Amino acid sequence: MDIRAMLLAAFEAEHREHLGAIRAALAAARAGAAPDWNDVFRRAHSLKGAARAVDLPAVEDIAHRLETLFDRIVEGAQPLDRAAEAAVTLALDRIEGMVAALAEVPEPALPQDAAAALDRCLSGSPAAAQPSAETAPAQRPAAAPRPAATEVTPAPRPAEAPHPPSAETVPAPRPAEAPRAEPAEAAPAVLRVAGEDVDRLSRAVHDLSLALQSQDEIGGAVAALESGGRALRRTADALRERAGEVSTLSRRLREAGDPGAAALDAALDLLRRLDGEVRAMVRGASGLARTQHRAAGTVEVAVRRLREDADRLLLVPAETVFGGYGRMVREIAREAGLPVEVRLEGLDRPVDRVLLQALKDPVLHLMRNAVSHGAEPPEARRARGKPEALTITLSVSLRGGDLVLSVRDDGRGPDIPRIVETARRQGLIPPEARPSTREALRLVFAPGFSTAERVDRLAGRGVGLSVVAEAVAALRGRARLRRAEPWGAEVIVTVPVSAARRPLLLVEAAGRIYALPGSATARLLRLAPSDLVPVSGLPHARVALDGREVSVPVVPLAALLGGPAALPVEDGRVRAVLVRNGADLCAVAVDRLLDVRPSLVGPPPPIGGDPGLVSGTVLLADESPALVLDPAGLVARSAEAGGRLAALPAPAARSARRRTPTILVVDDSITTRTLEKSILEAEGYRVFVCVDGQDGLDRLRRDGAQVDLVVADVEMPRLDGFGLLRAIKEDPDLTRLPVILMTSRGDPADIRRGLDLGADAYITKQKFDQRELLDTIGQLL
């Protein structure tokens, strides 16, 4: 990172602090309190100097005007009236917007609306035309001239170095200024670390955690060594008891002059030496077992703390994502001519940054929705005793294991009769239904629902709250709308913090990648065939776990998912994952153990997932999806596999075919076509993919001779599945090509239409089973 990038990173954090303090002072003034205007003046002054240091003249210029205005307020020469407050708010928003857009616009232009608004406030005093030397910004000889202000033009002064500040940049002492108390203790040091680096650290710690599970195996081996030593010692004790008899016999032989006495004496010496060595070995084994047990406990505690600390590094203040929402909502309201006050509460809460990113768009939708549906005419607000400006509050809190986001407004509130009427008109409820208030408020999250009278930039498209509902459901959370007290509406979003990211173990089975929750992974196993014994027709292995040996079934993961039943063996070993679900265990055999990574888990896919085994999906590094398997389903399915597993058919040999059949998959959903491609390739087919019907038709007309079968979605842009099917059947070169239609539309009329057009099979995604697809393809080929 170059020096300017480092300075900009520091400025980005510093400017947020200054803007937050100035906005807090404005809010205090609105509430009737007396803000510390001296501190506000210094904030504007510091902001100006910081902007100069990173060479942002537009920010510096606006900060200078703010500084001049606050200087007047401190001196009592100008009040903070409504116009001044609006000008300051606009200026702060423009500064925040310029800094947020530095990646796209590294040299932002002076925002004329903010400059003009501040100049209008400053024009009421003669001093405005000649700001003091303490507050005037430095002139840059090489910079392009700034646009002339509408009424006030700051006087230039000689350029100065940003560090250290010269006497001109320091505001003059003010007699009335009270000394500021020093903080009781220094704030913690803050380091800026790339998110990718933190992810890598967390991933390495979880790798270490899994690798150290081998301590269980070592502990079991040491315990076995100690047990064997004790057995050997018992044998040595029995030999020592017999040694007395041998010693008596040796003495008699010596008295009789028998030369065999010397051999017996030598054997007795060896026996005594062996007894001593066995006792020493047993003491060593016992000591080693105690040391290993203590070391394993210490390492386990250290790794657990390290894992907790690494996971904590993934947390960032909610302000990093939601901090700019106040500016964005005020800008939206300005364009609509609506006065709005935005309050942001609890943004200092540390939250997983991936979870915050997942909630970024839904929260913005909620705030836009609050503006569009909560706004009232000023006279209506005054008649009800409300302030003229609509107040929207975004609050972030952590309650137990949940992240709670609330978007509240003091506007008109939910119109229950209108909601019910709209729901009836859209067919969401029967005409005779009389839903309760709570039931009616749930209707607003339905797709396409909107009570807006017209479509504009703010409302009427019916996507806002349905987007919220879908995003929150994907995070295993919930959203609800309620009336706010005393006025307005509030949407509360509750999402489990654990939904942010979960440690996942990636494995490969039958050519496809799957993910297992790290919390359910008890051990990683490498088993020799001799380690497996049949129990009730199912291979079992004895493994050490929690200081004891347990017998667990070993089942091919591919077999549980409807694939090959044979145990995968590589280099003479079976690689397996010991999966734990409460007190139940099973070992799933896999082809390869790939990786451990914390990832955001999404909902299960529409097709390709067994509801009893699949709990979600995760995107891999190449953006392809992988199924997340449910530990409870794996354990239950493995318990049911006995007696059936050996009867599963072996995969058909493809070598007898003249060539590998080629299948064209046509679907506009990347998730669906990727899953179908994975299923078919795992079965040995060659697969082409196309993104819509027109793309598929073009591919067939170019490479149709290589394609043996088409699997196509029905609902696609440009050319849908019915149109593709019709074009295939009307083309003499393609008419004999088998076509399978796959769609979420299970309407009998649609199925009949597809079959009438010449489809060879019609499979609905709701009832999708990969074996059905593979069996259908096998029959058609």
Image (spheres, helix red, strand yellow):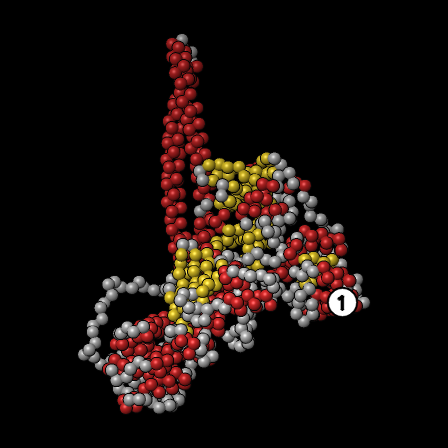
x and y, in percent, of residue 572 in the image? 58, 43
* Nearer to the camera, 246 or 305: 305
> 482 above or below 109?
above
Residue 22 seen in the figure: no
Q: Residue at x 45, y 80 (%)?
A: 337
* Nearer to the camera, 450 or 537: 450
x and y, in percent, of residue 729 in the image? 78, 65
User: Residue 536 is drawn in which quadrant?
Assistant: top right
Q: Residue at x 34, y 72 (%)?
A: 20
| Mark 1, secondary structure of its residue | helix
* Amino acid beneath label 1: Arg
> 227 above or below 191?
above
Relative to 396, 761 lies left or right: right
**Residue tagged by mark 1?**
726
Which residue occupies the extreme top position in the image? Answer: 256
Relative to 582, 116 lies left or right: left
Which residue occupies the extreme left position in the image? Answer: 175
Relative to 289, 675 lies left or right: right
x and y, in percent, of residue 643 in the image? 64, 38
User: Residue 349 is drawn in which quadrant?
Assistant: bottom left
Relative to 759, 9 lies left or right: left
> 763 above or below 538?
below
Q: How many C-alpha atoms fall within 10 Å of the one at disc 1: few (<14), some, or many (≥20)? A: some
Q: Residue at x 55, y 61 (%)?
A: 434
Quarter of the image with the N terminus in it: bottom left
* Nearer to the camera, 589 or 755: 755
Quarter of the image with the C terminus in it: bottom right
Residue 207 seen in the figure: yes
x and y, in percent, of residue 473 in the image? 52, 59
* Nearer to the camera, 142 or 238: 142
Q: Count the marks: how many?
A: 1
Q: Residue at x 71, y 48 (%)?
A: 652
